[in-house]
């Protein structure tokens, strides 16, 4: 059921200090089907399949929660800001409407 | 004589092709299927604000392309120039559209840990319409910014 989807967390800029505001980009490979598209071969509607919730957390403490709908583009991209408090780990958990749960983590290493 | 017959035949066949093609096209247009979470813009806005007053503000900046060549991928960026302190911060950013089947695109709940009211994503637009950013501040004030996006190829449905 829960196949591992390809996803990526990017922190911009690459070099930052404690207290700096960085951009956290999260990209995931997902079809984001609207349920309104027809399969050209069978003529049947493709069932809706989209990410409905995304949570960004730092060391287990959520700092941004998101609800998303099928109107977000295929292979969604979510970008938020984050003020780095210390060394730690950013984790993004996401769930889609079929109940599939996945997560991705990235270490935060501020310098100075 | 043979040549004349041939030319007449050509003309006739082309005329038939021209008259039939529009009828074929209109036959393909079927009523749109309803999506799983259809909600029009007014209902969505009322559900978010709960009937509260919405202010237009300069502190809220919405960045969208004026013309989107492909409606399936429209970059949206929302920036709020507001402090992110313990009791005074940007609570939520809602990205909405006015004409898709589902008017809601994303609801983002922020905390002071974010450091800045910022959100960027890519959304689908079914046609030329407005993209709306609704921002809720921690004191319950709602800010709104709307911008029209011209879509040349549809993305939804």
Image (spheres, coloured by chain):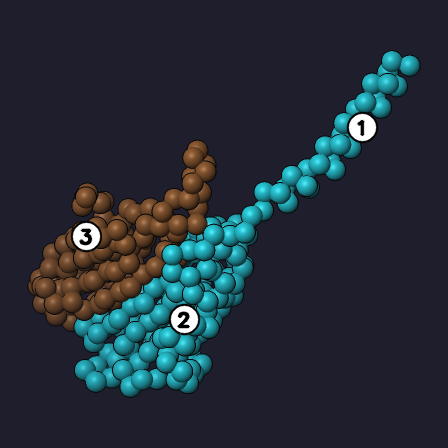
Chain colours: A brown, B cyan
> Marks 2 and 3, Cα distance to the nearest angstrom?
27 Å
> Marks 1 and 2, Cα distance to the nearest angstrom?
54 Å
What secondary structure is marked by label 1? helix
Residue B47's quadrant in the figure?
Answer: bottom left
**Horizontal and vertical percent position of residue B38:** 42, 61
**Horizontal and vertical percent position of residue B11:** 81, 28
Q: Can residue B97 be seen in this snapshot? A: yes
| Residue behind mark 2 | B44
Residue pushed farthest right? B1
* Residue occupying image coordinates x 38% and y 44%: A46
Nearer-the-camera pick, A95 or A28: A95
What secondary structure is marked by label 2? helix
Q: Chain of mark 2?
A: B
C-beta proximity under 8 Å, tags 1 and 2: no
Q: Left or right: B45 with respect to B129?
A: left
Quarter of the picture containing the N terminus of chain B is top right
Q: Can residue B76 be seen in this snapshot? A: no
Q: Left or right: B147 with respect to B85?
A: right
**Horizontal and vertical percent position of residue B110:** 25, 72
Marker disc for residue B12:
1
- Pointer 3 local density, CA inside 10 Å: few below 14, some 14–19, many at least 20: some
Residue pushed farthest top? B2
What secondary structure is marked by label 3? strand
Residue A82's quadrant in the figure?
Answer: bottom left
- Pointer 1 local density, CA inside 10 Å: few below 14, some 14–19, many at least 20: few
Marker disc for residue A101:
3
């Amino acid at each position: 059921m829960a196949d591992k989807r390809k996803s990526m967390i990017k922190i911009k800029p690459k070099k930052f200090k404690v207290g700096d505001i960085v951009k956290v980009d999260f990209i995931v490979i997902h079809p984001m089907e609207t349920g309104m598209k027809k399969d050209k071969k069978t003529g049947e509607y493709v069932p809706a399949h989209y990410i409905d919730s995304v949570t960004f957390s730092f060391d287990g403490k959520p700092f941004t929660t998101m609800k998303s709908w099928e109107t977000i583009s295929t292979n969604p991209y979510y970008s938020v800001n984050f003020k780095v408090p210390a060394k730690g780990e950013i984790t993004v958990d996401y769930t889609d409407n079929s109940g599939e749960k996945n997560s991705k983590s990235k270490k935060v290493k501020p310098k100075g | 004589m043979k040549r004349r017959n041939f030319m007449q035949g050509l003309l006739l066949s082309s005329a038939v092709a021209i008259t039939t093609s529009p009828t074929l096209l209109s036959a393909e247009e079927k009523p749109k299927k309803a999506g799983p979470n259809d909600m029009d813009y007014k209902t969505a806005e009322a559900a978010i604000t709960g009937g509260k007053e919405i202010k237009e503000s300069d502190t809220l900046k919405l960045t969208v392309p004026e013309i989107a060549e492909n409606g399936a991928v429209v970059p949206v960026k929302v920036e709020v120039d507001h402090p992110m302190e313990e009791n005074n911060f940007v609570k939520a950013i809602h990205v909405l559209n006015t004409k898709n089947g589902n008017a809601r695109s994303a609801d983002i709940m922020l905390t002071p840990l974010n450091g800045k009211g910022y959100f960027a994503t890519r959304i689908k637009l079914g046609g030329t319409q407005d993209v709306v950013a609704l921002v809720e501040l921690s004191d319950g004030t709602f800010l709104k910014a709307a911008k029209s996006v011209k879509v040349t190829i549809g993305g939804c449905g």
